[in-house]
Amino acid sequence: MSKGISVHIGINEVDPYKYPLSPYRRGGKYAVLSDDYHPVDFDCDFWVGWRGSLSSCELDADNMYALAKKQKFKAKRLKTKQATTDNVINAIRGAAKELQAGDTFLMTYSGHGAQVEDLSGDERDGEDETWCLYDRMFLDDEQCELYAEFRRGVKILVLSDCCHSGSATRSGKASAPDALPDDEIGEKREMEERTALNVYKGRKREYDQIQRSLRNPSPKLKASRILFAACQDHEHAMGYNNGGVFSVALLKIWNDGRFEGTYEDLAKEIRDELQKDYNRNVDEKRGDASRVFLQVPNFVRIKGSSQKALDEFVNSRPFEI
């Protein structure tokens, strides 16, 4: 009998000591870049960290955990302080050791997304996408290498509700960038570019060593994998008090298990739902689309050892073990 293991990550805040913002010399004082880019002067040299505070990511983890439990997954939550890199890696590796052909691994992430310099040369835009775990950024190349540990015939499903998530588990393709509105409402699940650059500089040696320690090219994937991403690599994913826009749309369409389509159908309906929200908001602004945010989710299919296995996975009922 097939079985499923799931891990649900929700991070409302990171450890500021692990996300240092780089100070720089300005006149006789040190200035530290704050989250909103306004330099703050201090009389001495010390590190100030980024907290990345959000309000609804743990709620997303709770909701996806409840969905997985109802579908008979062996489910686990990692929320904020529990969502360390070691805990996430151990959870993935534990599932890889336990699951056999026909089994399913489900992982969901809600939190900040970021980008760092790509040292391996495998990214067309020169940047690796990351998840901001509690203690450090978790690179998409790291995920890719871990997924290669799963056996042939295992099905891997990843839901990434964060900014820059279009190819969050690597091997995905995102569309070209569009202009973003100036007055987005809600919480952007993004570490801003300038903040990310300074956080990266603050631990550059460590992040560079992580990238150099990974195999290049990445080991060949044996398991079939599907990625549901909240947005394209260049886009922002939004969150409100009731959860991430993407996660809320997914749960609405899933309709407590009443949804009868395939994974591909689910991806299309989520995309249509977000487009409807956009159209409705534009109407409310009397046609002024410049003040409305459009979030375009990404659906990525990644072949393992068998194209047939991937096709069967894509055309199966979502979240079914």
Image (cartoon, rainbow, N blue to C red):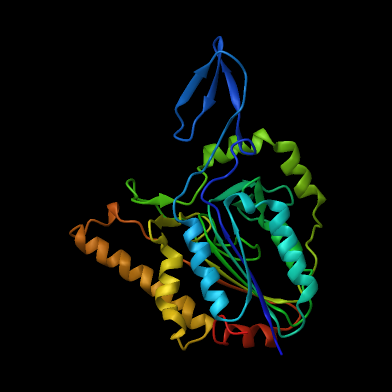
> Picture quarter containing residue 29?
top right
**Which is nearer the eye, 217 or 41?**
41
Q: Residue at x 30, y 56 (%)?
A: 292
The quarter of the image holding the N terminus is: bottom right
Give the percent coordinates (x, y) of residue 109.
57, 61
Q: Residue at x 25, y 61 (%)?
A: 282
Left or right of residue 51: residue 275: left
Give the percent coordinates (x, y) of residue 317.
54, 86
Count the marks: how many?
A: 0
**Which is nearer the eye, 153 or 2?**
2
> Picture quarter containing residue 16?
top right
**Which is nearer the eye, 275 or 319?**
319
Q: Residue at x 47, y 60 (%)?
A: 59
Q: Is residue 46 above or below residue 172?
A: above
Which residue appears farthest toward the top when viewing the image? 28
Q: Is residue 141 visible?
A: no
Q: Residue at x 76, y 47 (%)?
A: 210
Give the percent coordinates (x, y) of residue 183.
32, 46
Left or right of residue 22: residue 253: left
Which residue appears farthest toward the left when viewing the image? 286
Q: Is residue 266 visible?
A: yes
The quarter of the image holding the C terminus is: bottom right
**Which is nearer the eye, 304 or 73?**
73
Give the percent coordinates (x, y) of residue 241.
38, 56
